[in-house]
C-alpha cells in the first residue's frame, strides 16, 4: 500500500510539473508579441523625447509616424547600408564590435518649422549597468538639439538623474565639434561647467561614476559617427 501511495504521488507530481511547464510555455508564447510591442513603443517614445516631443504609450506610434520621417543605417565610414532596418539595430552589441565592424542607426525627424533633425543612438556602461539613449543633432551635424538617456540600475537620486529633464536640458545647443571641425564630444564637468564652453555641462552631483560612464559613452558612440557627420558638413557648405 505504501509503495502504491509513493508511486501515485510520484506520477501525480510528474504530471503536474509537465502541465505547469506547458502552461508557462504557452503563456510566454502568447505574451511575447505583446512584450515586444511594448518594447517597440518605449523605444519610439525615447526617440521622440530626444527631439523634445512628449508622448504616452497611447499616442507614441501616431507621433512617431508624424515626426520621424526617415531612417537608415551607415557604417563608420559613412556609407549607407542597404537592406538593414535602423530600428532593429541594437547599439550595445554594435559597441562590442571593432570600429570597422559597426553598423549605426540614423533617424530623421522633420519638425513643424521645416527643420530636419538627425537622431543617433548611444550605449555605454554606468556605475551598476548599461546606460543608453539617443542624441538629436541639428542640420549642421555639430549642434545638439536634444537628448534622451536611460538606465537599468543606476542609483536613485544620483546616477539615475541622467533621465531627468533638468539633466537633459543642459545638452541643448552644445557642440560636438569645435570651430576647426575637430571632434570634441561633450565633457561632464564636476563642480560646474563653464557657461561659455562649447561642450561642457554639469556632471551629476554624487553621481561621478555614472557621469564618467556617460561622458565615455558619448565620446565612443558619437565618435563612431564622426566620419558621417564630417561628410555631411562638407555637403552642406
Image: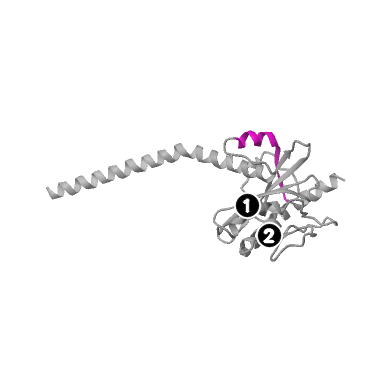
Specify which label sits upstream in the sequence, 2 or 1. 1
User: Where's residue 128, x and y in %?
Assistant: 55, 60
Left or right: 184 as drawn, with respect to 104: right
The reply to whether discs 2 and 1 touch (Cβ–Cβ < 8 Å) is no
The residue at 70%/51% (across/down) is: 169
**How far apart are the two marked residues, 2 and 1, measured between alpha carbons?**
16 Å
User: Helix, strand or loop at disc 1?
Assistant: loop
Residue extent of the magenta highlight: 59-76
Q: Is residue 96 visible?
A: no
Which mark is in front, 2 or 1? 1
Quarter holding residue 62: top right
Residue identifier under label 1: 164
User: Where's residue 56, x and y in %?
Assistant: 59, 39
The residue at 32%/40% (across/down) is: 19
Residue lying farthest to the bottom in this orientation: 191
Residue lying farthest to the right in this orientation: 237
User: Helix, strand or loop at disc 2?
Assistant: helix
Asked if 109 appears above or below 230 in the picture, the reply is above
User: Where's residue 12, x and y in %?
Assistant: 24, 43
Instruction: State the residue in front, 75 or 41.
Output: 41
Residue identifier under label 2: 215
User: How was this image coloured?
Assistant: one colour
Amino acid at each position: 500500500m505504501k509503495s502504491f501511495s509513493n508511486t501515485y504521488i510520484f506520477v501525480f507530481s510528474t504530471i503536474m510539473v509537465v502541465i505547469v511547464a506547458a502552461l508557462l510555455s504557452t503563456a510566454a508564447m502568447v505574451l511575447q508579441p505583446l512584450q515586444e510591442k511594448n518594447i517597440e513603443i518605449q523605444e519610439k517614445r525615447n526617440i521622440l523625447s530626444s527631439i523634445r516631443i512628449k508622448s504616452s504609450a497611447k499616442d507614441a506610434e501616431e507621433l512617431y509616424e508624424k515626426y520621424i520621417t526617415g531612417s537608415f543605417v551607415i557604417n563608420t565610414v559613412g556609407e549607407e547600408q542597404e537592406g538593414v532596418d535602423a530600428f532593429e539595430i541594437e547599439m550595445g552589441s554594435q559597441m562590442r564590435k571593432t570600429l570597422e565592424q559597426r553598423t549605426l542607426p540614423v533617424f530623421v525627424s522633420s519638425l513643424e518649422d521645416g527643420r530636419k533633425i538627425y537622431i543617433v543612438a548611444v550605449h555605454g556602461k554606468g556605475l551598476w549597468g548599461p546606460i543608453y539613449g539617443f542624441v538629436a543633432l541639428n542640420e549642421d551635424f555639430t549642434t545638439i538639439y536634444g537628448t534622451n538617456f536611460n538606465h537599468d540600475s543606476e542609483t536613485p537620486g544620483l546616477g539615475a538623474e541622467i533621465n531627468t529633464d533638468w539633466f537633459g536640458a543642459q545638452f541643448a545647443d552644445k557642440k560636438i565639434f569645435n570651430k576647426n571641425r575637430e571632434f570634441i564630444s561633450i565633457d561632464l564637468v564636476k563642480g560646474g561647467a563653464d557657461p561659455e564652453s562649447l561642450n561642457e555641462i554639469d556632471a551629476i552631483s554624487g553621481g561621478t561614476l555614472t557621469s564618467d560612464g556617460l561622458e565615455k559613452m558619448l565620446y565612443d558612440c558619437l565618435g563612431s559617427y564622426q566620419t558621417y557627420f564630417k561628410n555631411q558638413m562638407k555637403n552642406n557648405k
